[in-house]
Image (spheres, rainbow, N blue to C red):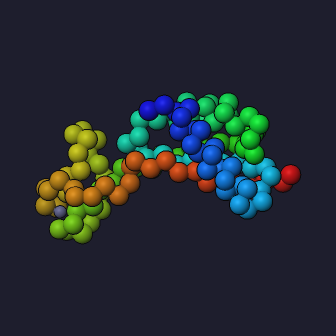
Amino acid sequence: MNELSIVHGLLKDLQDESKKHGVSHVSRVHIRIGSLCTIVPEALTFAFETASEGTVAEGAEVNVGVVPARGRCDKCNIEFDLDMDTSMFVCPQCGRTAAELISGREVEIALFRGGS
Ligand SMILES: [Zn+2]
């Protein structure tokens, strides 16, 4: 996955959010990425720092958190982690392949307002 194109998308969201809330400068951003996204956190941080120049997030501290991939079994109504060996969601109770992926593919950004 291309970190820079992701960052451009996130920055656009950030600008829109800032404008909506009248925020002129963002001091800290937190980015959550799903573990199934093939994103390198360090590369994402670097891309963000580079791309945010001249935006409300210029100079902001960047935190990247990885959200573990989880699936859900409809039959047992339980949630469980991805089996990293097989890269498959197999229900530990009934052995079925999970019907639903509940996390692991998201890329989300949260901003923290800074002083002007
Ligand atoms: Zn099950």
Residue 37 figure quarter: top left
Left or right: residue 114 versus residue 14 is right
Left or right: residue 61 versus residue 94 is right
Q: In the displayed orientation, state which residue is furthest to the right.
A: 116
Whole-percent x, y for residue 42 in the image: 56, 32
Q: Residue at x 25, y 41 (%)?
A: 87
Quadrant of ligand 1 in image: bottom left
Q: Is residue 42 visible?
A: no
Viewer-side residue, 65 vs 7: 7
The N terminus, quarter of image: top left
Viewer-side residue, 85 vs 111: 111
Viewer-side residue, 65 vs 19: 19
Whole-percent x, y for residue 23 in the image: 77, 56
Whole-percent x, y for residue 111 in the image: 66, 53
Q: Is residue 35 visible?
A: yes
As drawn, 113 above or below 8? below
Q: Residue at x 23, y 45 (%)?
A: 88
Q: Residue at x 54, y 34 (%)?
A: 5
Q: Residue at x 66, y 33 (%)?
A: 51
Number of marks in the rendered image: 0
Whole-percent x, y for residue 44 in the image: 56, 35
